[in-house]
Amino acid sequence: MRKIFGFIIGLFAGLASCGVVFVLLSLIFRLPEGGAVQAGTFASAPEAALSSELVAPTVLAAEETAAVPAVQPAVQTQTAIEPVRQASQLSAFVRNALPFNMPTNTRGLALVMIVPPGVDVSPLAGLPLTVAIDPMVQSDQIGAFRAMGFEVLTLLSGESRNSVPALSQAIASMTGSVGVLDRETDSAPTADIALLTLLGEHGLAYVGETGFSGIIGPAGEAGLPAMAVGAQIDRSTDLARVRATLDRATIDVVQRGHQIVVIEMEPNVVMLMLSWVDVPKPRGMVMAPVSAVLRRP
């Protein structure tokens, strides 16, 4: 009996010891509530950190890729408009001058024809001539004269010369002109200042009939092409004197250099010039548009 009783006591003692050990182990190694969820969170934390490092460059790359289409059109637009911007900065003298190669060791005679409304100079088309037209009544004919192969000067006289508003309007309306032909010998000082300013703003040449007593000197000092008229032929001049003036001008070109002759055109003068251009000229002289004989900046 005693052995049996001792065995039972030992059994209970062993069970109690196991229970105590189990409780202690449970306290030591007990997982927090929601252990599976917490374990999943802890396990994904490194992955989340790694994922953020991988996603950040991807997002940045996406942002850069999205930014490229926004930048490229701006660059392309700037490139496309640059030639237009540069073209707009060219002076009217250079932009509207007709292509002309002055032969080596030659001097040019520029014949400037003042063409009144109603006078047809188309028979002279193709010759290196220059026309001067009144901007008040002929500004819409610039295209037609240029299509004939003529250079164009803006004719200034009277109201369009001495009225500053009219002067500004006249020059602005003659967009195909290489310069102005100034026929006013008695100009107002304010108009002179306004004209010089407009010539500089538009980049136009100046041809004057008043010699260097006018504004040719200041125009040249401002870097503008400028030159005085060497001879002029009025409408009242008979044809014999017209031809003699042209012949004398060819000699002046050879002896003195480039010359400008202004001719007031009439139908009979047109026919005379047609016959005159076919006559042999002195060696070293050529007919040329006015831009080819003007002093350039």
Image: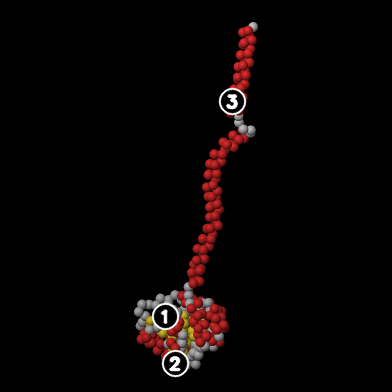
Q: Residue 104, percent across and down?
A: 36, 77
What residue is drawn where x is 49% and y is 90%?
185
Residue 14 visible here: yes
Q: Residue 258, percent across and down?
A: 40, 83
Front one among 243 and 76: 76
- Where disc 2 sits, the SS reads helix
Residue with the mark numbered 1? 295
- Where disc 3 sits, the SS reads helix
Looking at marks 1 and 3 on the same chain, the residue that comes earlier in the sequence is marked by 3
Q: Residue 249, percent across and down?
A: 40, 87
What residue is drawn where x is 52% and y is 82%?
194
Q: CA distance from mark 1 to mark 2?
A: 29 Å
The image quadrant of residue 20 is top right
Q: Residue 137, percent across and down?
A: 57, 83
Give the quadrant of the N terminus: top right
What residue is drawn where x is 63% and y is 33%?
34
Residue with the mark numbered 3? 25
Amino acid identity at mark 1: Arg
Residue with the mark numbered 2? 241
Q: Are marks 1 and 3 in contact (CB under 8 Å)?
A: no
Question: How has the structure been colored for display?
Answer: secondary structure
Give the quadrant of the C terminus: bottom left
Number of other residues with Cα within 10 Å of mark 1, as a class: few under 14, some 14 to 19, many 20 or more: some
Does residue 59 lie above or below 109 as drawn?
Answer: above
